[in-house]
Image (cartoon, helix red, strand yellow):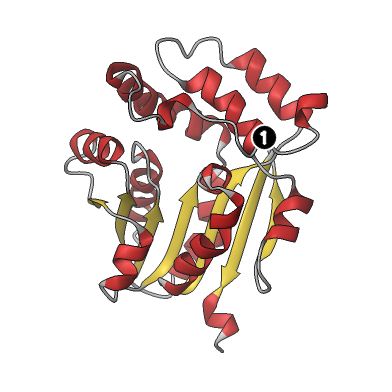
Amino acid sequence: MHLLRERAAHAVEEMDLPGCDPVRLDRTYAQFALVNRAVSGWRGIYRSQLRPRLRKGPATLLDIGCGGGDVPVMLSRWAARDGLQLEITAIDPDPRASRFAAERHRGAGVTFRQSTAAQLAGEGLSFDLVVSNHVLHHLPEDELPAFLAESAGLCHGRVIHNDLRRSPAAYALFFAGSWPFTGSYIRQDGLTSIRRSYTSAELRASAPPGWTVIRRTPFRNLLVLDRDRAHG
């Protein structure tokens, strides 16, 4: 598929526009919960990448760019069901996302803040685990190194950035399966997200030394850094 041969790095997602419809935007945040449960693969990531570390004792986790807040809430619930102690902070620089997440998930045991990673670093904060979901493809290429450095600087354990992996199959399946998500930006922005996302080879070439790209199904890239191993 010709339009997927190269990253559509300059394509714009409608929900990122300051003047987008606030009703459609809130519906998009709400529908993220369904989409992430279906395709983001966080249950497997929790089991293989996070839970083994949580068994070592109480831990802290930062979710950068949390959007509607469903991912940190899922992680908090899974840890609680497993009898593991996990304190989660979830941040997003967009006041619209931060407001939605804090209101929708009030009482969920997650601390939501409108903030950037750089602001938390300026406060001297550090976490055992740092994660993000669908953030990497939103970043201009020249901002990726700084974002990765900031996330690494906030972590003294494992950093996991979970993102889409661009492919014609991913685009075709999302095009076919996203019809039910009406009244939101899920369908058109989801297709744009796939066009903006990295292949595994592209992400590997763009990441600094020390980061590892792990291919996961369906159509996922994990970009992982073990800070404790690097300093061990």
Q: What residue occupies the far bottom of the structure in this picture? A: 232
Rendering coords of residue 211 (x, y %): 65, 68
Whether residue 1 is visible here, answered yes or no, is no
Quadrant where the N terminus sits is: top right
Quarter of the rendering containing residue 82: bottom left
Which residue carries the number 1 mark? 8
Quarter of the rendering containing residue 55: bottom left
Whether residue 79 is visible here, answered yes or no, is yes
Element type at marker 1?
Answer: loop
Rendering coords of residue 179 (x, y %): 55, 10
- Specify whether 199 is left or right of 41: right
Front residue of this view, candidates 131 and 107: 131
Residue shown at 50% from the left, 46% from the top: 135
- Specify whether 187 is left or right of 104: right
Front residue of this view, candidates 159 and 198: 198
Q: Bin the neighbour count of mark 1 within 10 Å (Cα to Cα): few under 14, some 14-19, many 20 and up.
A: some
Q: Considering only vertical position in the picture, is 183 above or below 161?
A: above
Q: Amino acid at mark 1?
A: Ala
Rendering coords of residue 65 (x, y %): 40, 48
